[in-house]
Image: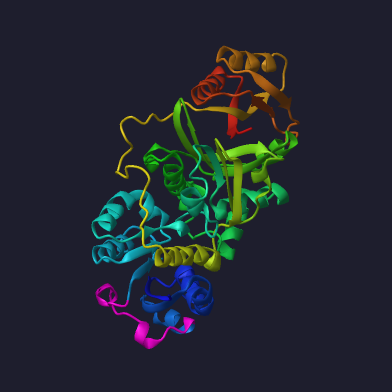
């Protein structure tokens, strides 16, 4: 039997417009393959010219949120406004009106899913957010319905297209960060204010959502170590490649007997690692389960139609499943008291120093590392960048050590007078 489902879309920007286009153009396809008759009953957006350009019928244009929620034909409300202001108000109102909500809003879900899910449960409606993480890549559905037989031990992901585009350009064209950022802004890959992307906030929100689902316990974003790419120097990318590494901004989650570690930062990975070949605005998540072993999902991490694909997949899922799935963990504002978080995590390190080119310096540097309990894999002195330079680059790759030990070594080197630490990048093997 064909099921009729009415949808309202709040915000017809890039993702909302792509969602409207997909639902309208694929209506007959969904009717044939999914046995659902999905119609867009209402849209709400202040930009009437945009609605006109998309061909939205006048009778579907709502004047306010009250009109949307009062429509008995609207079963599912799609929120693609973004942010945590108006979007949170509208989503809360929709759930209280017993309308199932589908959203692409990672910040909203990261910070307020505990509040929104409680309202959804009380009103027996759904809250779906596949499009909040990794664009069109079905990572959330995979965690819920694909690898649920496993204890997920770790995940590493390139989950932000803007930073991946920038690092790809820096890697293969040797361009400086500032130069590539301007290019990314012109192309629309980066916002005028790129802070959320380049400083790692976007990846942090997504890691909070994904690690909570993977490890079946609440991982607040406040527990995530975060470091962005704005201080990455193109020379370090080049030196890293000489050692056989590629630089990516990774969202990393690990769950072991020691506890849970969650971090976002620039990371060197071996060039033969599957994530090393994920370039430009593409995203990927590489995870390891105790039964399935390694799995990687790869695809478009952003864009109107890829993200709309994820939004519409949630609409179809909600329309074809009477049983509503909520979080598999206690979704509170904070982590459970018995969950241990590892802050002094273990990693190998790439460390670049600027030192005087004279006898005894190398011995002093290695001596400091030794006193801090850090073993060195490789150490290479590079040529001075110009004849005027009084100091030369010294690049060190360490064996796996702890974050605190690495910070201690950096502090001691900077205080020793033999040189200064110019860059510290973590290395995942």
Residue 407 coordinates in the image, percent (x, y): 51, 25
Residue 280 coordinates in the image, percent (x, y): 64, 55
Q: Is residue 62 magenta?
A: yes
- Tell me which residue sits at (49%, 48%) in the image: 143
Residue 104 coordinates in the image, percent (x, y): 43, 60
Report the quarter where the N terminus lies: bottom left
Q: Is residue 292 above or below residue 372?
A: below
Report the front residue among 423 and 222. Answer: 222
Q: Is residue 108 above or below residue 53?
A: above
Is residue 153 visible from the viewing direction of this image?
A: yes
- Tell me which residue sits at (57%, 44%) in the image: 249
Magenta residue span: 54-73
Report the quarter where the C terminus lies: top right
Residue 172 coordinates in the image, percent (x, y): 72, 50
Q: Is residue 170 magenta?
A: no
Q: Report whether 74 appears left or right of 270.
A: left
Report the front residue among 388 and 264. Answer: 264
Q: Report whether 333 appears left or right of 341.
A: left
Q: Give the image's coloring scheme.
A: rainbow
- Tell me which residue sits at (35%, 42%) in the image: 329
- Quarter assignment of residue 4: bottom left
The residue furthest bottom is 58
- Quarter assignment of residue 378: top right
Q: How many marks?
A: 0
Is residue 195 visible from the viewing direction of this image?
A: no
Q: Is residue 275 above or below residue 187?
A: above
């Amino acid at each position: 039997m064909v099921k009729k489902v009415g949808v309202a879309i709040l915000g017809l920007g890039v993702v909302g417009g792509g969602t409207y286009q997909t639902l309208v153009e694929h209506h007959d396809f969904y009717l044939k393959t999914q046995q659902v008759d999905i119609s867009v009953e209402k849209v709400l957006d202040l930009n009437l010219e945009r609605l006109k350009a998309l061909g939205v019928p006048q009778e579907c244009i709502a004047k306010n949120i009250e009109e949307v929620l009062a429509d008995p034909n609207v079963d599912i409300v799609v929120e693609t406004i973004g942010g945590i202001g108006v979007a949170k108000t509208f989503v809360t109102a929709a759930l209280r009106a017993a309308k199932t909500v589908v959203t692409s809003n990672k910040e909203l879900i990261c910070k307020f899913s505990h509040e929104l899910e409680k309202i959804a449960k009380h009103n027996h409606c759904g809250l779906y957010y596949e499009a909040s993480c990794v664009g069109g890549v079905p990572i959330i559905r995979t965690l819920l319905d694909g690898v649920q037989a496993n204890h997920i031990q770790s995940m590493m992901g390139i989950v932000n297209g803007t930073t991946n585009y920038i690092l790809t350009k820096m890697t293969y064209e040797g361009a400086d960060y500032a130069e590539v950022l301007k290019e990314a802004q012109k192309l629309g890959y980066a916002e005028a204010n790129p802070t959320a992307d380049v400083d790692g906030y976007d990846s942090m929100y997504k890691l909070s959502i994904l690690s909570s689902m993977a490890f079946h316990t609440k991982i607040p974003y406040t527990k995530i170590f975060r470091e962005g790419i704005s201080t990455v120097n193109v020379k370090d990318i080049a030196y890293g490649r000489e050692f056989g590494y590629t630089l990516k901004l990774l969202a990393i989650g690990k769950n072991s007997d020691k506890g849970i570690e969650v971090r976002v930062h620039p990371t060197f990975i071996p060039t033969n690692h599957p994530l090393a070949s994920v370039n430009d605005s593409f995203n990927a998540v590489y995870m390891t389960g105790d039964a399935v072993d390694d799995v990687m999902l790869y695809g478009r991490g952003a864009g109107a139609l890829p993200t709309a694909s994820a939004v519409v997949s949630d609409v179809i899922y909600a329309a074809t499943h009477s049983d509503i799935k909520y979080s598999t963990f206690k979704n509170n504002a904070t982590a459970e008291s018995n969950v241990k978080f590892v802050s002094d995590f273990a990693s190998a390190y790439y460390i670049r120093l600027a030192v005087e080119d004279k006898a005894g310096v190398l011995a002093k540097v290695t001596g400091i590392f030794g006193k801090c309990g850090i073993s060195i894999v490789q150490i290479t002195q590079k040529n001075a960048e110009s004849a005027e330079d009084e100091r030369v680059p010294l690049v060190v790759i360490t064996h796996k050590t702890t974050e605190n030990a690495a910070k201690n070594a950096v502090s001691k080197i900077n205080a020793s007078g033999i040189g200064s630490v110019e860059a510290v990048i973590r290395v995942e093997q």
